[in-house]
Amino acid sequence: MTEWVEFIVGDGGTLSMSGIPEPQTRSEVYEHIADDWQTSAQDLFDAMDQCEPLAWAVQSIYEEVRGQVESSLKLAVANRAFNQPRINALARRLSRMPDDPSEATGEWLLALSDEEFDEIIVPEIQEWFDAPPDPIHESDHWPETATPQSIAMAYWQKAEASLREALGVVIVEGEHPGSTYFAAELTQPIATANQRALDLKLPIRFV
């Protein structure tokens, strides 16, 4: 029995694969790493290498922690007569935390103890995975199976150019410089495309 492939035609002709729900959390978008990072700092570090938005999330934690150390040092300095040992300890800690998180976060993460990793990192990263994805800033880094729209685009990218032309499907990779819009679009009426698919005996439908 022939298995039909159905595409939903949205605004402007944007195609989405039918039967695929929109992801509600980052765990659904980044499912290839969502369950492989909690065991240790090394596992998270490896996952960051596969997912840049996750690296950004860890860098944000680093910046937050560094900011807390910097603030504590300023408070201690304000009471120098009573806090010299604390000042020295905080200054040493801050000296090991460079300003640039993109360069410093990995080394800092791997130097955390298991207890620090569980206390500082795990809750915030789990919250990040449980939150909705950010299509504006993250979609360039999503796997092709992340959304119904990206699955449809991947399908048509792999299709023969002659097939796309016959059915009136085009690939749009950014509407303008810097655009994050990437999609397959249907450029002719749905009825026309469906009739053409029937004529070509293709198990494809547009709705």
Image (tube, rainbow, N blue to C red):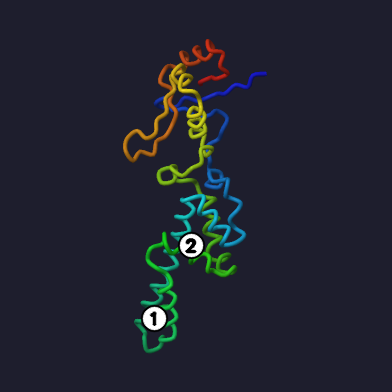
From the top left corner, tell me how far across and down residue 161 is, in percent. 46, 22
From the top left corner, tell me how far across and down residue 134 is, in percent. 45, 46
Query: Dot 2: within a 10 Å radius of its alpha carbon, few (fewer than 14), some, or many (20 or more) residues?
Result: many
What's the residue type where badge 2 is placed?
Gly
In this rendered view, identify the residue nearer to me: 163 or 189: 163
Vertical relation: 50 (above or below) 114 = above
In this rendered view, identify the residue nearer to me: 65 or 172: 172
**The disc label shown at residue 59, or none:** none
Residue that lies at the very extreme toward the right in this rendered image: 1
In this rendered view, identify the residue nearer to me: 72 or 143: 143
What's the residue type where badge 1 is placed?
Ala
Vertical relation: 25 (above or below) 175 = below
From the top left corner, tell me how far across and down residue 94 is, in percent. 41, 73
Q: Quadrant of the N terminus?
A: top right
Q: Residue at x 48, y 33 (%)?
A: 149
Contact? badges 1 and 2 (CB < 8 Å): no
Secondary structure of the residue carrying tag 1 is: helix
Q: Residue at x 53, y 62 (%)?
A: 121
Q: Residue at x 61, y 51 (%)?
A: 35
Residue that lies at the very extreme toward the bottom in this rendered image: 81
Residue that lies at the very extreme toward the top in this rendered image: 199
Q: Within the image, what quadrant is residue 103 found in?
A: bottom left
Vertical relation: 143 (above or below) 200 = below
Please state which of the two labelled residues, at mark 1 or mark 2, is closer to the viewer.
2
Reading the image, the residue beneath label 2 is: 106
Which badge, 1 or 2, is on the more N-terminal residue? Answer: 1
Reading the image, the residue beneath label 1 is: 76
From the top left corner, tell me how far across and down residue 186 is, in percent. 43, 22
